[in-house]
Image: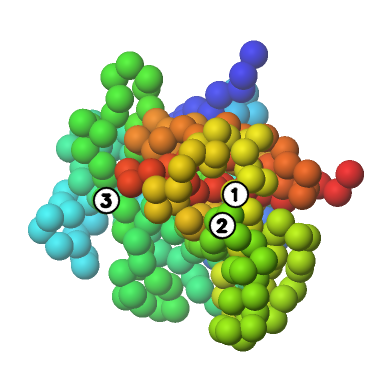
């Protein structure tokens, strides 16, 4: 049976086990979030504080506290707003996706109560700052700094973004699995030798890899390559069709092979064309292909572990 994340009141019966979760954090993380003992004390004295213990079934794994009355720096269009005051997941449960599920629950509940947005702040000078986690979730950096912390905010999507049949909603975003960064630009061609000669001899790109049907050039920033269309015929029949401007490909990286599957599913749900489902390729990558509204074919990929 799948384990479930749930939020529970902090009581005399569980307060000690919640407090000691802070001991599992690294020194860098302890510099980013106050001890749970301090948070519980502040929450009990602060009139607009709402706080809960985070459980995975019957196991305590974290603590979260929200200030239900956030007004400072909040523009009218983002009101009413709350402030994510404290949020921690015990060390052994970090990197499991449970933190994101907690935020999903918070957003669902608060949005149903009429809240429009959630703010938080991050220490920026610590190696294990949660800044990237919040940005990946969808928080936006305001650029405002107070007491060495950066202010972020997350505008709640509206209920109409929830798909009634599939249950898919804003909490499943492709950026949870695919990094929004162009890692490789590939020009597809049926004239590989002429193209190689042009980019090497005419434009001056040095050749980094030459596999005959695939040539990658030295380039600053995104990787840049040319490839024969025939190479991808077995992956998708779309590449064997007559060229209709599909002469280049954007390739988006994922951190893990399984993220390719998740990102592909979400992309298709959001309207991308399903070209080729995830599959392991001979060049030691797991890839999937999708198309944009103009029919341009793009790729998501992740490096496979060395065999």
Provide residue 218's location: percent of width, then percent of height: 67, 77
* Circle 3: element type: strand
Find disc 3 in the rendering and name its residue: 155
Q: Nearer the viewer, residue 134 or 229?
A: 229
Judged left or right of residue 176, residue 287 is right
Given the current orientation, which residue lies at the most extreme right position?
307
Specify few, some or many for label 3: CA neighbours under 10 Å numbering under 14, 14-19, or 20 or more: some
**Quarter where residue 171 is shown:** top left
Given the current orientation, which residue lies at the most extreme top position?
1
Pair 2/3: label in front: 2
Going from N to C along the chain, the mark reached first, 2 or 3, is 3
Find residue 207 and name its label: none
Find disc 2 in the rendering and name its residue: 189
* Circle 2: element type: strand
Q: Quadrant of the N terminus?
A: top right
Do callouts 2 and 1 mark residues in contact (Cβ within 8 Å)? yes
State whether residue 147 is above or below residue 21.
below
Q: Is residue 118 visible?
A: yes
Q: Residue at x 76, y 68 (%)?
A: 209
Q: Quadrant of the C terminus?
A: top right
Find residue 229 and name its label: 1
Specify few, some or many for label 1: CA neighbours under 10 Å numbering under 14, 14-19, or 20 or more: many
Specify few, some or many for label 2: CA neighbours under 10 Å numbering under 14, 14-19, or 20 or more: some
Q: Number of callouts in the render?
A: 3
Q: Residue at x 63, y 57 (%)?
A: 227
Do callouts 2 and 3 mark residues in contact (Cβ within 8 Å)? no
Provide residue 51's location: percent of width, then percent of height: 41, 42
Pair 1/3: label in front: 1
Estimate the spatial distance between the alpha carbons at disc 2 and disc 3, rounded to whole Å: 43 Å
Judged left or right of residue 81, residue 285 is right
**Quarter where residue 186 is shown:** bottom right
């Amino acid at each position: 049976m799948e384990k479930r994340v749930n939020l529970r009141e902090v009581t005399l019966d569980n307060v000690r086990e919640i407090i000691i979760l802070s001991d599992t954090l690294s020194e860098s993380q302890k510099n980013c979030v106050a001890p749970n003992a301090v948070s519980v004390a502040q929450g009990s004295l602060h009139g607009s504080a709402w706080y809960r213990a985070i459980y995975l079934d019957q196991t305590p794994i974290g603590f979260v506290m929200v200030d239900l009355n956030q007004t400072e720096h909040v523009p009218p269009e983002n009101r009413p707003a709350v402030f994510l005051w404290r949020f921690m997941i015990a060390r052994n449960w970090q990197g499991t996706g449970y933190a994101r599920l907690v935020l999903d629950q918070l957003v669902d509940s608060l949005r149903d109560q009429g809240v429009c947005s959630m703010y938080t702040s991050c220490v920026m000078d610590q190696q294990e700052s949660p800044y990237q986690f919040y940005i990946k979730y969808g928080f936006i950096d305001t650029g405002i700094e107070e007491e060495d912390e950066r202010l972020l905010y997350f505008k709640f999507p509206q209920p109409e973004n929830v798909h009634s049949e599939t249950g898919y909603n804003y909490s499943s975003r492709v950026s949870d699995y695919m990094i929004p960064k162009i890692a490789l630009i590939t020009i597809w061609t049926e004239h590989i030798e002429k193209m190689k000669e042009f980019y090497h001899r005419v434009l001056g790109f040095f050749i980094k890899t030459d596999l005959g049907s695939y040539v990658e050039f030295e380039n600053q920033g995104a990787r840049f390559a040319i490839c024969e269309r025939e190479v991808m015929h077995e992956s998708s029949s779309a590449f064997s069709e007559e060229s209709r401007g599909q002469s280049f490909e954007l390739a988006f990286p994922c951190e893990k092979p399984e993220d390719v599957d998740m990102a592909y599913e979400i992309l298709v749900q959001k309207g991308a064309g399903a070209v080729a489902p995830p599959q392991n390729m001979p060049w030691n990558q797991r890839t999937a292909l999708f198309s944009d509204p103009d029919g341009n074919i793009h790729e998501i990929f992740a490096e496979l572990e060395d065999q």
